[in-house]
Image: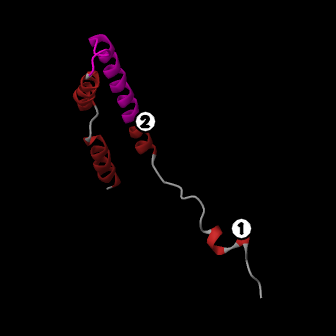
Amino acid sequence: MVIYVGKESRFLMNSSKIISKKGKTDLEVNDLIFMIFMILSLFSVALFIISGNILNKYGYVFFIRMIVIFGEIIPISLKVNVEMAKIYYSY
């Protein structure tokens, strides 16, 4: 009778780290969206500083407004369009 313990047990051998499979297109889209978000944040901070609302008690409201206004820069439908293009090209 053989008993496996430690690293050779079936439980530990099956508990390896799960690798997420993503294509190059998905990774590039994610990088582009992250870059656009960083630009959005930079614009919001710049306008927050330029407007002089730093010393204001409710200056953070202006900052949140700028994030919401510039939020239109990030295309939510971009990922949907990429997925639809993948389906189309697979045919």
The residue depicted at 28 percent of the width and 49 percent of the height is 84
Say few, some or many: other residues with alpha carbon within 10 Å of mark 2 (under 14 / 14 to 19 / 20 or more). few
Q: Quadrant of residue 4?
A: bottom right
Say few, some or many: other residues with alpha carbon within 10 Å of mark 1 (under 14 / 14 to 19 / 20 or more). few
Q: Which residue is mark 1?
A: 7
Main SS of the magenta segment? helix
Front tag of 1 and 2: 1
Which one is nearer the viewer's eye here, 61 or 9?
A: 61
Q: Amino acid at mark 2?
A: Asp
The residue depicted at 34 percent of the width and 20 percent of the height is 45
Tag 2's secondary structure?
A: helix
Which one is nearer the viewer's eye here, 12 or 65?
A: 65
Comes first in the chain, label 1 or label 2? 1
How far is mark 1 from mark 2, CA to CA?
A: 37 Å
Q: Is residue 15 above or below residue 2?
A: above
Tag 1's secondary structure?
A: helix
Q: Check if residue 91 falls in the magenta segment.
A: no
Q: Which residue is mark 2?
A: 31
Q: Position of residue 68 (x, y in %)?
A: 24, 30
Judged from this view, the residue extending furthest toward the right is 1
Q: Amino acid at mark 1?
A: Lys
Q: Magenta segment range? A: 32-57
> Which quadrant, please, contains the C terminus?
bottom left
> Which quadrant, please, contains the N terminus?
bottom right
